[in-house]
Image (tube, rainbow, N blue to C red):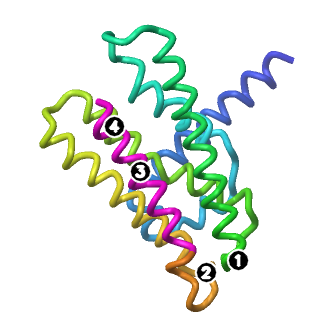
Amino acid sequence: MEDTITKRLEKGAWNLGMRVVYILGKSCYVNRGEELLKWDFTLPFIISLLFPLIVYFPSGTTDADSRNKAFALFFAFIWIMGLLSAVNACLVGIYLDYLPVMSILLSEMLPICISAIAAKFVPFFLRTILVTLGVVYSLILAKRTFDGHVAQGRWLMVYQPIAFLYMTTGVLVLFNN
């Protein structure tokens, strides 16, 4: 019994690592994110846990109660905005189901998350550049992934909430470090 559980955990960790490499490497851009259409919520869940930890927990000047509230609010922000962006995309004219869209949206926040980790250790000017690059890369990945799945003439209506989600997350990361 333990062998199968261990093997499943190893396989899950391997798949998660390959998904991270796929998103951060140029494969996701070149292949228009086709691999992300095989969706799961493991990576989005890890990202949504990692973001608040990166942004709010290291500040030692605030008490634990306010850090816990900030963590919960940012965690909820990521999932609620992802939910609203995915529902909007599905209602406005994307040819994908709701759950894959939400999984893709939250998975493609990984470059912002990586830039947030790096931004912790640099001055504000370099932090701005790093976070901007992370947001732009996430936006480009979203555009490439959803390009062939959006109804004719509906791209702006689908993409606007996605851009708002990524840019707002970038601003929160930028000014809370």
> Label 1 belongs to which residue?
95
**Vertical side of 35 occupied by 21: above or below:** above
3D distance between C-alphas at marks 1 and 2? 6 Å
- Residue 131 point in image, percent of width and height: 28, 47
The front one of 26 and 72 is: 72
Specify the label residue 150 is tagged with. Answer: 2
Q: Is mark 1 in CB contact (under 8 Å) with mark 2?
A: yes
3D distance between C-alphas at marks 1 and 3? 26 Å
Nearer-N-terminus badge (4/3): 4
> Label 3 belongs to which residue?
168
**Element marked by disc 2:** loop
**Element marked by disc 4:** helix
Nearer-N-terminus badge (4/2): 4
Please provide the residue range marked out in magenta: 158-177
- Residue 65 point in image, percent of width and height: 51, 11
Q: Specify the amino acid type for callout 3.
A: Thr
Q: Specify the amino acid type for callout 1.
A: Tyr
Q: Is mark 1 in CB contact (under 8 Å) with mark 3?
A: no
The front one of 34 and 152 is: 152
> Label 4 belongs to which residue?
116
**Vertical side of 164 occupied by 111: above or below:** above
The front one of 162 and 113 is: 162
Nearer-N-terminus badge (1/2): 1
- The answer to whether residue 111 is seen in the rendering is yes
Nearer-N-terminus badge (2/3): 2
